[in-house]
Image (cartoon, grey):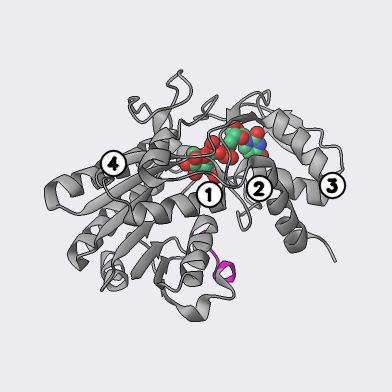
Amino acid sequence: MRYLVTGGAGFIGSAMVGELVRRGERVAVLDDLSTGKERNLAGVLDRVEFHRASITDLEAVNRAARGVDFVIHLAARTSVPRSVQEPLETNAVNVEGTLKVLMGARDAGARRVVYAASSSAYGETPTLPKTEAMPAAPISPYGVSKFTGELYAGVFTRVYGLETVALRYFNVFGPRQEPGSPYSGVLARFLLAAIRGEQPVIYGDGEQSRDFTYVDNVVDATLRACTAANVSGRMLNVAMGTRISLNDTLRVLERITGHKAEARHEAERAGDIRHSLADIGLARELLGYEPKIGFEEGLRRTWEWYRAEYAQP
Ligand code: UD1
């Protein structure tokens, strides 16, 4: 089978590409290297067809999509605070870019598109865990953009008969997640601080919680969604199904590193949600998905990777 992975040089994308190559699939990657890196694909680069271009470039999308069976659409501006700073750019990539990927997949005759949607679509709906039946109520430009992508995917199934599945990922973490930007995911930032012996920063009181999901679980769910029956046109949560506060993640990190991690607190971030927890019953039922790597084990693996990657010689 031929797969196109948009954002394939990114954190989740490179894990996806690595697994596809391991399984002997043919893989094309479309990535503009705006946040992704070729280095993330070290070891598999000679076995993939690499297209360096943005998903906002329709011609490039069409070139990359030629002859494709499955499109795994991960390319996006992924940060909530960045979307607050740059709503237009977030919209151009996440909404218009997604529209172009869907058009490219449709015109290439792809069997299915699996779209990386986001738990941020739920916004501040107070009930936990979040089930797919709850209404979307995003509270950041990022949440709006990712939810809009879902709507487009559903409409492409309905109007053009293109099979699509939207997976709402919940706070993915793991090796190769970029730690060095103010827009980086919180666990990546905590790990880098731990390596440098710096104080981690917590925005707010640290009692906000997330359903942190190790990347291998997400790769597994996504590849299942490419071929599963009876999921086209649907949206499913992909998560661990447990939640932990930021304060508690630091306690787990202390156990792993053997060093104290005392946070410095700064003001809460605009657009942040307070708590997040998924009901993963539907993914279990329809995809046969089971998160195999738990939070602490995932954090341990991630720590080992960062240590090797970022430790000073
Ligand atoms: C994350 C993802 C987003 C995804 C969403 C739902 C990233 C960068 N964002 O958003 O793509 O769609 O989950 O799965 O991966 N925080 C700190 N200190 C820091 C950094 C962050 O306290 O140094 C706090 C934030 O204020 C927030 C929480 O940690 O309360 C999580 O932030 P972040 O890792 O950016 O993720 P989300 O905003 O939840």
The residue at which mark 3 appears reads as 197
Residue 167 appears at what percent x and percent y?
Answer: 39, 44
The boundaries of the magenta stretch are 34-40
Circle nearer the N terminus (1, 3): 3
Quadrant the N terminus occupies:
bottom left
Q: Is mark 2 within 8 Å of ligand 1?
A: no
Q: Residues within 10 Å of mark 1 (few under 14, many from 20)?
A: many
Q: CA distance from mark 4 to mark 1?
A: 19 Å
Circle nearer the N terminus (3, 4): 3
The residue at which mark 1 appears reads as 217
Q: Are marks 2 and 1 in contact (CB under 8 Å)?
A: yes
Q: Is mark 3 within 8 Å of ligand 1?
A: no
Which is more toward the observer, 20 or 137?
A: 20
Quadrant the C terminus occupies:
bottom right
Q: Are marks 4 and 1 in contact (CB under 8 Å)?
A: no
Residue 247 appears at what percent x and percent y?
Answer: 72, 29
Q: CA distance from mark 2 to mark 4?
A: 28 Å
Q: CA distance from mark 1 to mark 3?
A: 30 Å
The amino acid type of the residue labelled 1 equals Asn
Q: Residues within 10 Å of mark 4 (few under 14, many from 20)?
A: some
Q: Residue at x 48, y 79 (%)?
A: 47
The kind of secondary structure element at disc 4 is strand
Vertical placement of residue 115 versus 240, above or below: below
The amino acid type of the residue labelled 4 equals Arg
Circle nearer the N terminus (2, 3): 3
